[in-house]
Amino acid sequence: MEILSYSMKWLELTLRWGHVLFAILWVGNSFLFNYLDNKLNKKISSKDVDGEGYLMHSGYYYKLSRLKISPPKNYLRSLTIFKWQSYLTFVTGILLLGVIYYYKSGILMVDKKVLEILPSTAIIFSLFSLIISWLIYDFLCKSSLIKNNVLFVSIIFILLIFLSYGFTQIYGAKFAFLSVGLIIGTNMFGNVFTVIIPNQMNIINSSKRNKKFDQSLSLAAKQRSIHNNYSTFLVLFIMLSGHYSFIVYHKYNWLILSAIAVISALARHYFNLRGRNIHRLYILITSIVSLILLAVLILIFKN
């Protein structure tokens, strides 16, 4: 039994380590490519080129061009597609969910002071929530609502509040928080696995057959990539929240999480605009002031 317990500890450690490493790579890629898109000089464009830009790293200049056409076929053979960071982040996350939380569901998921449910019921509901949430999100993305940014974001935020509150009425506080992060992370992975990568492969296959690729595939992939970009700050907060009991176990924890979602999205929006040389410092100041105000309110209304 001691060997099994010791082995489980090493398995947890390895999975946690891998999960964090792969998540860093995934988030880094997301930030980099959104930054590059925003920084491209669109004035430098032609029939084949949709903007150019320059970077410096490690003492060298790098020239970047976003093409409207396919590159030469010899480049297609060595083309780098950024997907494994996302895949491995999701796989290690799901394995962690099983090894830690589902394996000890009676302790880490169920809180009889909140709701008396069987550990097996808690696990089934957790898996069910991941699947249903993805289906709802994907449906909204494919509906006409996606054309109205304000309406789409409002619906997503209302759903987030519903989930944040709902999970606190079913699970213990820590797993309730984690469940929201699991859903967002699953949706981010779903964007990569079902839209971004398939669309990119369709574009590559069209290029190999000397066919003009469908620009709508690029736009759809970019749209999901932007959704992932705006989700990262909140997901990272939830990943760290387990270390801060004054937030997780606060009586208004669901409301705090909802507020953090808005604050983190505002901060991300500021940096995305800044990447396009649109400097709206008041957005960043608003997010910082809001975070300070939230901290004060948490102290005033402490348990």
Image (cartoon, rainbow, N blue to C red):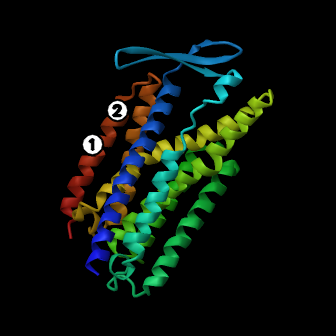
Query: How far separated are the C-alphas under marks 2 and 1?
Result: 10 Å
The answer to whether any part of residue 183 appears in the image is yes
The residue shown at (47%, 63%) is 94
Q: Is residue 212 left or right of residue 100?
A: right
Residue 282, numbered circle: 2
Nearer the observer, 65 or 125: 65
Categorize mark 2 by other alpha carbons within 10 Å: few (<14), some (14-19), many (20+). few
Q: Position of residue 151 (x, y in %)?
A: 58, 49
Residue 196 position within the rendered picture, expressed as x and y whole percent measured from the top left? 62, 43
Q: Residue at x 49, y 83 (%)?
A: 121
Residue 228 x, y percent position in the rendering: 50, 45
Q: Tell me whether the residue at label 2 lies in contact with that at label 1, contact meaning CB atoms closer than 8 angstroms.
A: no
Q: Residue 302: which quarter of the image? A: bottom left
Is residue 97 left or right of 217 when viewed as pictured?
left
**Quadrant for the N terminus in the image:** bottom left
Q: In this view, does 143 lie to the left or right of 59?
A: right
The residue under the point 44% across, 60% down is 93
Relative height, residue 34 to residue 65 (above, below): below
The local crowd at label 1, few if under 14, some if 14 to 19, many if 20 or more residues have their Cα within 10 Å, is: few
**Disc 1 marks which residue?**
289
Q: What element carries label 1?
A: helix
Residue at 60 percent of width and 50 percent of height: 193
Going by the numbered disc 1, the residue's amino acid type is Val
Q: Which mark is residue 100?
A: none
Residue 65 percent coordinates (x, y): 57, 19
In the image, residue 76 above or below residue 83: above
Instruction: Identify which residue, 197 or 49, lies in the foreground.
Output: 197
- Residue 238 sits in which quadrant? bottom left
Quadrant of the rendered image containing residue 284? top left
